[in-house]
Structure formats: C-alpha cells, structure tokens
Amino acid sequence: MKFRVERDALAEAVAWTAKSLPSRPSVPVLAGVMLRVTDGNLQVSGFDYEVSSQVTVEVQGDADGAALVSGRLLAEITKALPAKPVDIAAVGAHLELVCGSARFTLPTMPVEDYPALPEMPESAGTVEAAAFAAAVAQVAIAAGRDETLPMMTGVRLELSGGTLAMLATDRYRLALREMEWNPDDPDISINALVPARTLNDTAKALGPLGGQVTMALSQGGAGEGMIGFSGGTRRTTSRLLDGANYPPVRSLFPANSNAEARVPVSTLIEVVKRVALVAERTTPVLLSFSSDGLVVEAGGTEEARASEAMEATFTGEPLTIGFNPQYLIDGLANLGAQYALLRFVDAFKPAVISPAGEDGEVISGYRYLIMPIRVSR
C-alpha cells in the first residue's frame, strides 16, 4: 500500500474514526484503524463490535493495499503534522508516514485478524443533516450516564410516517424533539433505542456536511437490532439498545399548566450561572416568579447566599420552585431560541421549558421537562 493524501482530509478522517474506538479494547486489533486503498480511494475504518465508522477520502494511489495501525496514535500524529501533503506506505510490519521533513514509522497489526465491518442495514429514509444534528443535540443532553441502567443511556427514536420523534431521560429530566423527515415507506412505524453518545457523535460529524443523512434500520430480537447513518463520504453503524421495556415517558408531560413565564434565554442562563456560584453540587437554585418578574437565588455553606432579579413575563399565582442549576442551564442552552416559555403546574410537579418567540408562542417541536427539587424555606 502506498499513497499521497492532503493532510487536513487525512487528519479529519482519522480523528472521526478514532473517536469511537474503545479505550480498553477486548482484543488489541480493535484499537486500530484500518487504512485500505483501492482505485484512488482511501477507506479509513474503525469497529469495536458495537459501533463501526467508515470514511472515504480521495488520494493519489500508487499501490493498493491495507494496513492496520493504532487509531489514537495515528490521530494524534496526523493532527500535529505540518500543512503539507502526506505520503504513506506500508513497508513490511510498519507504516511509514512522511510529511515535509517529518517522518514517522509506526508498527502495524495483522490485517487478517481484524473483523469485517457490518453491512449497512436497509434504508428507512432521509433527514436534513443540519436539522438532524441540532435535534440530536437538544435531546442527547437528557440521556443518562449510568451504565448500570443501559436503557436510560439511549435516545429513543420513534419513526411514525413523516414524523421523527426523539426522546431521552435520566429520570430527572426528559427531552422530546419532533421533526419532519422523508421515510422510504410512508406507513413506517418503528421504534429504536440508540446509544446517546454514538448518536450525538454521529450527528455532530454529519451535520456540518450538509445535504441529507440516510437512516438505515434492521430490527432483530431484543437488543440485536442495528441502525446506520450515512452522509457524504461517511457512514456509521451501531447496535441498538434493548428498548422493549422503555417507560411511557411521554405521559410525564402535564396536560395543563396553572402558570407560565416567558424569559429571555441568554439573560436567565447568565443569572443562574452567577447565582449558582455559592451553591453546592446538590443545592438547587430557587426561581421566584411573580407579576414583578423573576428573582433567582441560592444558598451555600457558611451562610453564603446570592440573589438576582431579572425581567420576566409571568401569568398565574406567585410561585417559587427549585431546580438543579446545571440541568436548568442544559435545557435553556439547547432551546435555539431567544426566549423560553416555562410552564408550571405547581412547585412540586415537573416544569416544561419550550423555545418561544417574542410573542410567547412556542416555535418548534422541542420540549424539555425538568423535575423540581423540594426545598424548605
């Protein structure tokens, strides 16, 4: 194998592929990225039996072939190379990389020991790349991080006709985003639970490419299904989580509200960040709403306290409610709107945050539910 490639294209391809590689692989070859050159195209691939990533880059190919080399090491090297063409050649049990006056010799692993990447499942439809990336970012923040509860670490995709819905929850907050997409079968009705981290990384990579993202699905038995995404020259597949017993979380959204507030998003984020400086990790920030506006306050150890007033349009009986400050900031920061509409039942029931326009009308299919923290005053 011997080829020449542009440094930026190589670095980007290797970085994306290496990102999904396991830090503690069950067998050494799974820490590698496969470089395979055929007919002037370089395929950079990674696979850990759960997630596969593959990107194709145009190169000047002198000799076709394949080499398997440490993914993380190659990613660090290619990122640090000068902005010049890169010459790569497989020589015996080594990979030689030359860029300008920089030269690296890396040991390779046996290509024949590397598992074959899974085939892409059957296409289910397409969705606009940038909109898909924005929607995934809004929802993935609410997914759980506790690996002992694998179901909560996923994003549930609900494909129903021309509507694509995404749901995620860690039991303390719940994010829901509904959007239009283009199904291959207009009568499609499938649910899939995708690992949130994989979905988020994939959406971040495919979003900036523009165009359409193709979603592909195969449903096996419990936990045996697979999902694939492709856009531009990139494709990725992931095993699905077992979502057979995913709780009916949509029912957590209150049917009615007794009070609602419209607040400027950026101002509220800044105020919450400032006031939370005195709060300990488990201490909530208190939001007190009235016809006069909003007061945000928090207390910490040794009687450290902070409060700040800000403008807010509020309707309903005066209300004081406590939230985890980081969960509140996460929801606000991902609204993608100038104003937030907060709806309340009372101080002890979940609140729902939606993006709103200046007139207070909700402007997209995004809802972020956040559980209050009970406080004694």
Image (spheres, rainbow, N blue to C red):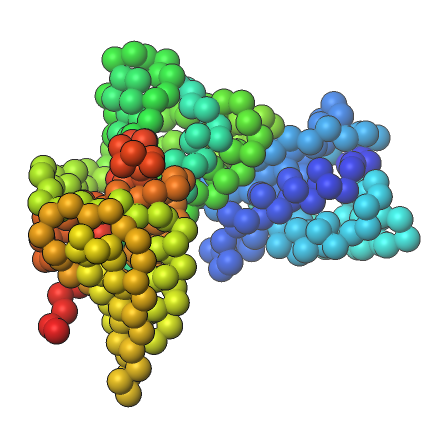
Residue shown at 31% from the left, 74% from the top: 306
Q: Please name the residue shown 13% across and 65% down the image.
A: 374
Residue 189 in view here? yes
Closer to the camera in the image, 334 or 359: 359
Q: Is residue 134 left or right of residue 191?
A: right
Give coordinates of residue 157: x percent, y percent: 30, 33
Position of 137 with respect to 310 (left or right) is right
Q: Left or right of 315: which side holds 262?
A: right
Q: Position of residue 118 (x, y in %)?
A: 47, 32
Q: Residue at x 77, y 30 (%)?
A: 59
The answer to whether residue 150 is visible is no
Q: Is residue 327 shown above or below 99? A: below
Whole-percent x, y for residue 259 in the image: 13, 46
Furthest-bottom residue in this view: 302
Q: Nearer the viewer, residue 43 or 248?
A: 248
Residue lying at the far front in this picture: please name it.
292
Q: Which quarter of the rendering shows the C terminus?
A: bottom left
Question: Which is nearer the eye, 21 or 173?
Answer: 173
Q: Is residue 300 above or below residue 55?
A: below
Residue 322 location in percent, x, y?
A: 20, 63
> Left of 295 or right of it: where is 61?
right
Residue placed at 42% from the left, 31% from the top? 132
In this figure, what is the number of numbered marks?
Answer: 0
